[in-house]
Each structure stands twice: as C-alpha cells, then as structure tokens.
Amino acid sequence: MTSLSAKDKATVQAFWSKVSGKAGDIGADALSRMLVVYPQTKIYFSHWKDLSPGSAQVKKHGATVMGGVALAVSKIDDMTAGLLNLSELHAFTLRVDPANFKIIAHNILVVLAIMFPADFTPEVHVSMDKFLASLARALSEKYR
Amino acid sequence: MVEWTDFERATIMDIFSKIDYDVVGPRALSRCLVVYPWTQRYFGNFGNLYNAAAIIANPLVAKHGTTILHGMDRAMKNMDNIKETYAELSVLHSEKLHVDPDNFKLLSDCLTIVVAAQWGKEFTGEVQAAFQKFLAVVVSSLGRQYH
C-alpha cells in the first residue's frame, strides 16, 4: 500500500472541511448500514440493546467513530503516532478483526456518495479510499 | 443455489429499471479506473487514460461501461441461475481477457457507490444489502470457470 501524496492529503483536508459538519450523520448512517449489509459485524455489539438503524446507541457510536476519523485527518502527516492510543484500544481491548476496517470504510464511502454526490468525485474518492486504508493500517499497528 | 427473498428480487428489478445505463455504466467503469488504477492494465488500447479527467471523458471507456451494465441484465433476468448464465462470460474473462477475478469486486464496489449517489436517501441499508448480494453472486459466477 502506498502512503498519501501531498495531493491526497490536500484533497482529504479540503473534502473533510466540507463534510465534517455532518460527521455525526455520516457516522450514524455508515454504522447502521454496516450492521445491516454485513450482519457478521453485529457480533461486536452483542452488548447493545438496540442495533436498528438510527437507534440512540448506533447514533452515539457513529459519532465516536467519526471522531476517530477527524483525529486521523488532523494527524494526517503521521497517523501511526497520532492513532497510537486508538490502535492499542482496538488491539487489546476491543480486539476487532482488522478485516472489518475495510468494511466500515466502504460504508463511509457509500454514505459520502449519497450525501455529497457532486463533491465525491472519482479524484476525491481515490484520495479518501487511500486515507481510510492508511487509517486502518495505523489502527492495526499494535495488533501483533 | 442462491435463495432470493421477494424484497431482494423486487429491489434488483427496481434498481435496473430506474438507472440510466448510459450514465451509470460509464461512471462506474471510469471511477474504477481512477480509484484502482492498476485495472487500467486491461484497457491498453483504449487511448488516453492519462489522468482522471481523460478517463472520465474517454468515449471508449464510456461505451464499455454501458456494455458491462447491459451484461448484468442477463443476471437480472436469470436470478435463479446466474452461475450457468455466466459460464461462457466467465470463460471469456479467464481464457481470452485474462482479467484477475479480484478486479470484479473492485468494479462492483464502484458500481454500488455510483448507484448510491444516484439514488440518494432511497438507497437504504436494505437496498444496499440486496444490491451487494446480487453483485457478489455476479462476481462469484464470473470467477467460477477460472482454472
């Protein structure tokens, strides 16, 4: 996997500044979709009462996830260092199989396409895809 | 054999009846060539693929995108027998075109995103699930005859 070019970083930052106001909605929809389209991901939330789209727990957690994305944008020049604590959390406490990072990333991209059809051009798409892949790699750092 | 619910059948018919093949096909293929540039390896004789703008404007890419989408009609019309329906196409992609079957998934992800952008809020999680299930069966059938 390649690292982010200067152009990728600029594209991600510019697009993020356009969409970050809706981060909560993006996260909630992406998470809801993931639980419906990839039902195996529900195993990580077996302790929740309500896994239906738009439930309070899903909304709250969607916002939490997007908080992590916002952090990654702010630390885009060194995501490995910037996401160290989150990596330890996912590796040792949550023990989320890293294959699922691709799944949530795909659903984030689908939601971005739905909410920002004009802005989510192929060029923005490729930079965002690379960014989310880099984020996933940084999150996987502490696993083993 | 793949089991389809009534909702899934209706959703797939609905999606294909509402999309403009001449818009969605080109958009999906050009997006795939931009987001996953190694897929350009199959289109060496398509002319200018130098950058995103060139890919998006390329008439051969557009034409082929439409062709691919029409190819999915066959699956939509034979949902209980997609594997057999695509046997010949699978041989073609393996023996003649030499396409890495992993690339089918990349194109199907781009198609999902293009349809999502067109449909907006109506592209609910349930609709997405049905569409992605259909595409997964198409992708699997296309890869079936590789050896």
Image (spheres, rainbow, N blue to C red):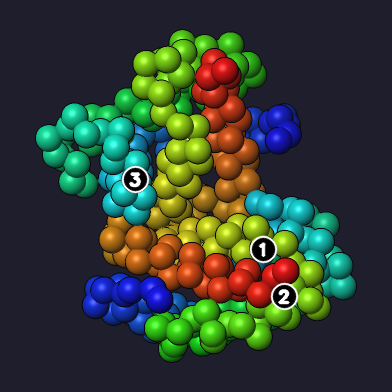
- Up/down of B72 relative to A24, above or below: below
Q: Quadrant of residue B31?
A: bottom right
- SS category of the residue bearing label 2: helix
Same chain under badges 3 and 1? The reply is no
The Cα atoms of the two marked residues, 2 and 3, are separated by 31 Å
* Residue tagged 2: B93
Instruction: Give coordinates of residue B104: x percent, y percent.
Output: 62, 64
Is residue B52 visible from the viewing direction of this image?
Answer: no
Q: Residue at x 32, y 25 (%)?
A: A64
Q: Which mark is on residue A15?
A: none
10 Å neighbourhood of mark 1: few (<14), some, or many (≥20)?
some
Of the two numbered discs 2 and 1 on the same chain, state the one appearing first in sequence. 2
10 Å neighbourhood of mark 2: few (<14), some, or many (≥20)?
some
- SS category of the residue bearing label 1: loop
The Cα atoms of the two marked residues, 2 and 1, are separated by 8 Å
- Left or right of B2, for residue B50: right
Q: Nearer the viewer, residue B38 or A144?
A: A144
* Residue tagged 1: B101
Give the amino acid type for the residue marked by disc 3 in the picture: Gln
- Left or right of A26, for residue A101: right
Same chain under badges 2 and 3? The reply is no
Q: Are marks 2 and 1 in contact (CB under 8 Å)?
A: yes
State which quarter of the image contains the C terminus of chain A.
top right
The chain that hosts pointer 1 is: B
Q: Quadrant of residue A131?
A: top right
Instruction: Give coordinates of residue A42: x percent, y percent.
Output: 28, 41
Q: Are marks 2 and 3 in contact (CB under 8 Å)?
A: no
* Residue tagged 3: A40
- SS category of the residue bearing label 3: helix
Q: Residue at x 34, y 37 (%)?
A: A27
Q: Nearer the viewer, residue B11 or B119?
A: B11
